[in-house]
Amino acid sequence: MVVILKNNATDDQIDNVKKHLEDYGFQIHESRGVQKTILGAIGVQPDFDTRKIRILDGVAEVYRVTAPYKLAGRDFKSDNSIIKIKDVEIGGNEIVLMSGPCSIESEEQIFKLAEIVSRSGSKILRGGAFKPRTSPYSFQGMGEEGLKLMRAAADQYGLLVITEVMQISELDVIGKYADIYQLGARNMQNFALLKELGNVKIPVMIKRGLAATIEELLMSAEYVLANGNSDVILCERGIRTFEKYTRNTFDLSAIPVIHKRSHLPIIADPSHATGIRDQVPPMARAAVAAGADGLMIEIHHDPEHAMSDGPQALLPEVFIELVKELRTIAQAIHRNL
Ligand code: PEP
Ligand code: MN
């Protein structure tokens, strides 16, 4: 931590800041210029609340130089984490596609879409059975019945299953059918659920919260890692900004930032990020170019009648064409898809 004192800080104020730093267990490195005094506080305390120093008289700025996360950071593990699930690797050279409907709606729907997912070359079938809807009057998902249908459809086409878990009480039932738990954006800081996801043996994909910083996303990952589950995948799905022409603002730069700071794989979700069908392919192409380890894309054969998120679902033929383009982009950056 670096503490910069005000130009007019008195000797007494500087001594008081130093005493506090020592009491908090830091070693001090002092640099006194003609005008500015800068204190380097040495000692790794990832959870230290820098406000304790910022409020002291004479302090101008306090900067943290070590990240508050440990296990999620590159300092802890310099190689990329590769999450292996059956014959699929997430975080390796291959870019992994997770596609399917927003919600599982019927046997006919999920089997039809699983066939398209498989034909496209995607390895993972997505679909929600327990849905986090903004309105309590909207379709809430098919529950376990939907999970059974999705598992059967995925098995028929040799796909893995990713599906959202919203609360601790759903973990067991979803765990019977899912290969990856999806923790939704609205639950990114549900710390009780994050802790429980640390105790399971199933990989977890954490979606970035609507108003979460990248650091907060990494801290959510830290909860799962610290509780014992090292199979964590991150997902950028857009954040809330002042922009109204898109559902959310797709923070593409989160992809290289996360790659630099963390060894965990990062998936991009251009469907929830933009919310409008015709904006999904350009952003999907951009995400591959930006280095995403995979994409989550919603598709539907009859989006007009979809129970949720129809306007952002790609039609099957558009999706199949998109995957071909993505393959070309992947090749250009020496990755497989
Ligand atoms: C979803 O994947 O269907 C979903 C609800 O996503 P998010 O949590 O990103 O809104
Ligand atoms: Mn959706």
Image (cartoon, grey):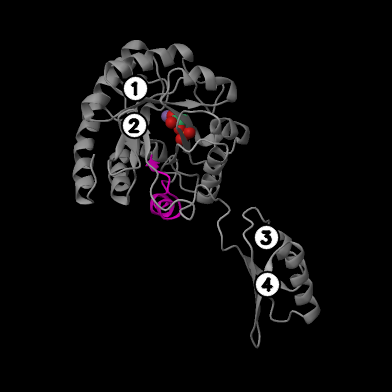
Residue type (three-letter) at the residue carrying disc 1: Glu
Q: Nearer the viewer, mark 1 or mark 4?
A: 4
Q: CA distance from mark 2 to mark 4?
A: 50 Å
Q: Nearer the viewer, mark 2 or mark 1?
A: 2
Q: Pointer 4: what residue?
A: 28
Under tag 2, what secondary structure? strand
Is residue 288 shown left or right of residue 81? left
Residue 4, horizontal then vertical, whole percent? 65, 73
Q: Pointer 1: what residue?
A: 304
Is residue 255 in the magenta section?
yes
State yes or no: Cβ of the residue under disc 2 lies below 8 Å from any atom of ligand 1.
no
Q: Nearer the viewer, mark 2 or mark 4?
A: 4
In the rendered structure, are the residues bearing label 1 and label 4 in contact, judged by CB atoms less than 8 Å apart? no
Q: Residues within 10 Å of mark 2 (few under 14, many from 20)?
A: many
If you read the primary sequence from the N terminus, does the residue marked by circle 2 or circle 4 appear first? 4
Q: Residue at x 46, y 30 (%)?
A: 182
Residue type (three-letter) at the residue carrying disc 4: Ile
Instruction: Please provide the residue range marked out in magenta.
Output: 250-268
In the rendered structure, are the residues bearing label 3 and label 2 in contact, judged by CB atoms less than 8 Å apart? no
Residue 7, horizontal then vertical, whole percent? 69, 81
Q: Residues within 10 Å of mark 3 (few under 14, many from 20)?
A: some
Q: Nearer the viewer, mark 1 or mark 3?
A: 3
If you read the primary sequence from the N terminus, does the residue marked by circle 2 or circle 1 appear first? 2
Residue 79 in view, yes or no? yes
Q: Where does ligand 2 appear, by image quarter? A: top left
Residue 98 tag number: 2
Residue type (three-letter) at the residue carrying disc 3: Thr
State which quarter of the image contains the C terminus. top left
Under tag 1, what secondary structure? helix
Q: CA distance from mark 3 to mark 2?
A: 40 Å
Q: CA distance from mark 1 to mark 4?
A: 64 Å
If you read the primary sequence from the N terminus, does the residue marked by circle 1 or circle 3 appear first? 3
